[in-house]
Amino acid sequence: MPVAAAHTREVRPPRIPQLDALRGFALAGILLVNALMMANPYGLGAVDDPDASTLDSTVEGFIQAFVVGKFYLLFSFLFGYSFTLQLASAERDGARPVPRQLRRSLGLFVLGALHAVLLYVGDILMTYAVLSLVLIAARNCSPGAAWRAARIVYGCLSALLLLGGLLSLVESEAEAADAETELAAGFPALVAGYRGDAASVVRANIGQLPDALLATVLMGGFVLAAFLVGVHCGKRRLLGDMEAHRARLRRIALLGAATGLPGGVFMALAVSGPLGRRWSLFGQLVGVVTAPALTAAYVCGMLLLMDTSRGARVAALLGPAGRMALTNYLSQSLIGALVFTGYGLALYDRLGPAVVVLGALVLYAAQLALSARLMARFRYGPVEWLLRAVTLARLPHSRHARSSATMRG
């Protein structure tokens, strides 16, 4: 852990516990998806695994329907909300917000590049770093402008993706099967790369970067839209007055579930279920377009739950992991790399999805327990401390007094 700086303690307003708990909740979904993607080359059913059992296919279908595409958007929403808090923090400190945020973006980009090359090619930090430049440029926008921009970005990108998905349906089942066979032809080399030594693991990651970057470009608009929704909510401080928004939260949760669940189930049926392979791409795109609705349902449902006595205990359990979400996110990839690649056990393409998901849940439980212990002593996780040092251009104080265990988000 980082050592304490010698300068005066920072005086910070109280954290927003809902933000921390939502981050902790998002970590679970991110881990489930990333673990399955790191474990084998089949991409959560995008290519049929000939050795998958019925249980494995069922687990993949569940993750497709309820998890894939939802939790990175939740993180993106929280990123946008937290951006408004960081602007307020700079104003309180009498600091210029733009240099701070540019340093933060640079720090995120460097962490993301190292993450993608060394650990897991499906990194999201570089995307956040680049798209955060849009937030910096639009930092003075009104809440209404942020909301309108989010709707425009989401609407235009959704229309383009759905049109592309519909056009893909003209492909015959035989043509879709041939394309899948061609894709799978590269899997033996990928398996050998991830089971080899450290250098071959790095080469395998670098080899996949072009495809990963293309997917990031296509999905970046949804990340940006989620950023802007977070900015809208942050500027209006919607998490500061739950009572005034309880009825709205219920409506959004119901409407989001009514829209997002059918889209997620259709994606699962198309990608991991009984529909033909020609439906796979269209199903994935339907799932992508409807994912924000289910994400909104998750957010509102969690906020309503946390406003109850039982939910408060859930928030207390998730909150410490959310306070060090960046450390936990990178730690998940590090442990995954040690399990699945030649860095450690080299179990790539040797474990079924059911076993991988079970292992991911055990890891998540361990992270919850360890985070609670660390956050009882420290203000920040190790990577959060490092990023904060880069952002502030000075060493932040790492420890906190017992009486100040709740700090600002």
Image: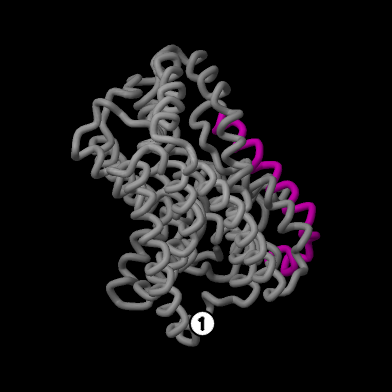
Q: Nearer the viewer, residue 145 or 61?
A: 61
Q: Nearer the viewer, residue 49 or 19?
A: 49
Stretch in magenta: 89-116
Choose top left, top right, bottom left or bottom right for residue 90.
Answer: bottom right
Residue 284, image x, y percentages: 45, 46
Residue visible at 26% across and 31% down?
352
The chosen color scheme is one colour
- Decide: is 355 above or below 305: above
Which residue is label 1 attached to? 241
- Among all residues in the image, which is located at the extreme bottom? 244
- Among all residues in the image, which is located at the extreme left? 54
Side of 247 relative to 220 (left or right): left
Going by the numbered disc 1, the residue's amino acid type is Asp
Residue visible at 59% across and 70% down?
13
Choose top left, top right, bottom left or bottom right for residue 85.
Answer: bottom right
Q: Nearer the viewer, residue 109 or 408?
A: 109
SS at circle 1 = loop
Q: Is residue 143 magenta?
A: no
Residue 11, image x, y percentages: 62, 66
Choose top left, top right, bottom left or bottom right for residue 261.
Answer: bottom left
Majority secondary structure in the magenta region = helix
Residue 376, image x, y percentages: 41, 56
Residue visible at 65% across and 73% down?
235
Residue visible at 34% across and 73% down?
305
Does residue 85 appear in this view?
A: no
Q: Is residue 99 magenta?
A: yes
In what quadrant of the picture does the C terminus appear? bottom right
| Mark 1, other Cα within 10 Å: few <14 / some 14–19 / many ≥20 | few
- Decide: is 184 above or below 277: above
